[in-house]
Image (spheres, helix red, strand yellow):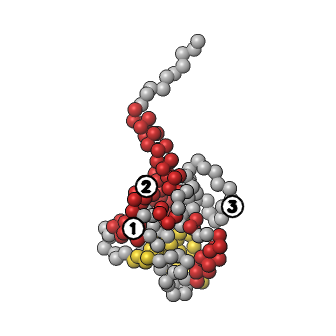
């Protein structure tokens, strides 16, 4: 019998693997739970941890900023949530407004964006009824929020979103999936790299 190389037992690696599997299980439970409770106070910490660990959300925000023109104009982030992407947008861009329905999430977003001297523009609203004038934004960003648009609401959502977008404006939408999970569908636009998209 040949000698086979033995992989040494590493308790740190075993613990990290166990923690990742546990987080993935909890995250999938969160993902498939009722959207009305996903962003309540008790679930936000799990959302943040899962979004950052499984989809590298802050890193993606840096990548997204690099894809925007040097002057993306008046920017709106729809479904900003607790601010994992928003905090990077707020730091890197000059004129950003953040919109979300969840007040607990927006409280965390406000804390995350307080470190700069630029005031944070936060709007608590449903993205189907956006309280902005026509053609108000040059750039609209939505990261992982589109899944909350029900099939019967899609036309209203797009009518409302394009209503507030300037004629020459840009839309940036990204929907994440846990890495390693296949997604059937079509990729539109640029290849966004290995961000679990």
Which mark, residue 186? 3
State the separation of the CA atoms marked 2 and 3. Answer: 29 Å
Q: In which quarter of the image is the C terminus?
A: bottom right
Q: Residue at x 48, y 26 (%)?
A: 7
Please give the residue where the numbered disc 1 appears in the rendered image.
104
Please give the residue where the numbered disc 2 appears in the rendered image.
46
Foreground: disc 3 or disc 1: 1
State the separation of the CA atoms marked 2 and 1. Answer: 14 Å
Residue 70 visible: no
Foreground: disc 2 or disc 3: 2
Q: Which residue lies furthest to the top in this view?
A: 1
Of 10 and 167, which appears nearest the observer?
10
Q: Which residue is drawn at 43% across and 77% down?
A: 123
Q: Quadrant of residue 10?
A: top left
Task: Left or right? Give the position of 167 relative to 79.
Answer: right
Of 92 and 153, which appears nearest the observer?
153
Q: Residue at x 59, y 70 (%)?
A: 149
State the separation of the CA atoms marked 3 and 1. Answer: 34 Å
Task: Left or right? Give the position of 152 relative to 36.
Answer: right
Q: Residues within 10 Å of mark 2 (few under 14, many from 20)?
A: some
Element assignment for label 1: helix
Which badge, 2 or 3, is on the more N-terminal residue? 2
Element assignment for label 3: loop
């Amino acid at each position: 019998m040949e000698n086979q190389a033995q992989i040494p037992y590493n308790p740190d690696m075993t613990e990290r693997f166990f923690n990742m599997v546990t987080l993935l299980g909890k995250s999938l439970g969160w993902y498939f739970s009722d959207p009305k409770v996903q962003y309540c106070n008790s679930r936000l910490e799990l959302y943040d941890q899962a979004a950052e660990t499984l989809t590298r959300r802050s890193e993606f925000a840096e990548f997204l900023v690099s894809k925007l023109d040097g002057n993306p104009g008046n920017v709106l982030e729809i479904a900003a949530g607790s601010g994992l992407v928003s905090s990077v947008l707020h730091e890197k861009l000059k004129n950003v407004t953040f919109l979300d329905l969840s007040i607990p999430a927006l409280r965390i977003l406000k804390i995350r964006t307080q470190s700069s001297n630029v005031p944070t523009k936060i709007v608590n609203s449903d993205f189907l009824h956006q309280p902005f004038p026509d053609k108000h934004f040059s750039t609209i960003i939505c990261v992982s929020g589109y899944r909350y648009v029900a099939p019967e609401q899609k036309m209203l959502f797009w009518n409302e979103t394009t209503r507030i977008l300037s004629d020459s404006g840009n839309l940036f939408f990204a929907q994440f999936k846990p890495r390693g999970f296949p997604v059937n569908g079509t990729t539109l636009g640029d290849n966004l790299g290995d961000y679990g998209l």
